[in-house]
Amino acid sequence: MKIIGIGKNYVNDTSEISAIKTGAQTIFTKPDSSLVIGNKDIDFPKITNQLAYEVELVAKIGKRGKDISLSDAVSFISDIAIGIDYTAKDVLAASRENKGPWALAKGFDGASPISEFKPMSNFSDLSAINFDLKINGEQKQVGTTSLMIYSFAEIIAYVSSFMTLEEGDLIFTGTPASGTGLVVKGDHLQASIEGELLLDFKMI
């Protein structure tokens, strides 16, 4: 099972999309050991003092595919969840100084908490899904898939041109353009899709 992420995939206004959309998507991978399920609390990682959150919708791949066409891409999604793509900002900055990869900054244990999955039948329009993140009861991020630069289908088609997608692979599809920040020990994170609370845990 692979965990795939896409960076910088949301805008604040749809008018921005045409100028930004070049076809070159920012893709990275995370190890499956970074995954946390079941709303388990997460130990604050010892490797960082700057832990940044990004709330994202997560698509689960339901069948194997390579070089998937844009028109068929959505049929490869079986379920959708909500998750947090954590980044150790100080680790990332140190890596970037030497033109290094994102792997350690995004791939540590606990870097990918996700909720239970909801079947695709729950979502009549993938371009109009609303989701949000609260921390300690305060709204931090609000997203809608209408503000995605690259759609679910475009992500799947692009990624599958490089690597075979397998059943059970997970794709973090990007975070809203505004509202990201840092978490500290004791923070309580709650993320919802269409107002339904699905992800609920604390940093300990």
Image (cartoon, rainbow, N blue to C red):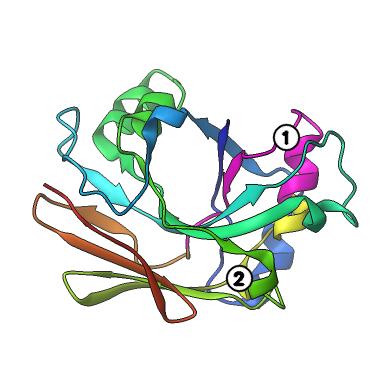
Left or right: 33 as drawn, with respect to 14: left
- Tell me if label 2 and label 1 are in contact, CB under 8 Å: no
> Which span is picked out in magenta?
155-175
Query: Is 121 rendered above or below residue 70?
Result: below
Instruction: Examine the image and state in which quarter residue 100 appears.
Output: top left
In the picture of the structure, the residue carrying the numbered disc 1 is 165
Q: Which one is nearer the viewer's eye here, 131 or 15? A: 131
Instruction: Examine the image and state in which quarter residue 77 appears.
Output: bottom right
Q: Label 2 is placed on what type of residue?
A: Thr
> For residue 160: magenta?
yes
Residue drawn at x 72%, y 43% is 24
Secondary element at tag 1: loop
Residue drawn at x 23%, y 44% is 51
Q: Tell me residue 33's x, y (percent).
A: 39, 28
Query: Is 113 rendered above or below residue 130?
Result: above
Q: Tell me residue 103's x, y (percent).
A: 43, 26
Q: Label 1 is placed on what type of residue?
A: Leu
Left or right: 99 as drawn, with respect to 152: left
In the picture of the structure, the residue carrying the numbered disc 2 is 145
Residue drawn at x 71%, y 77% is 125
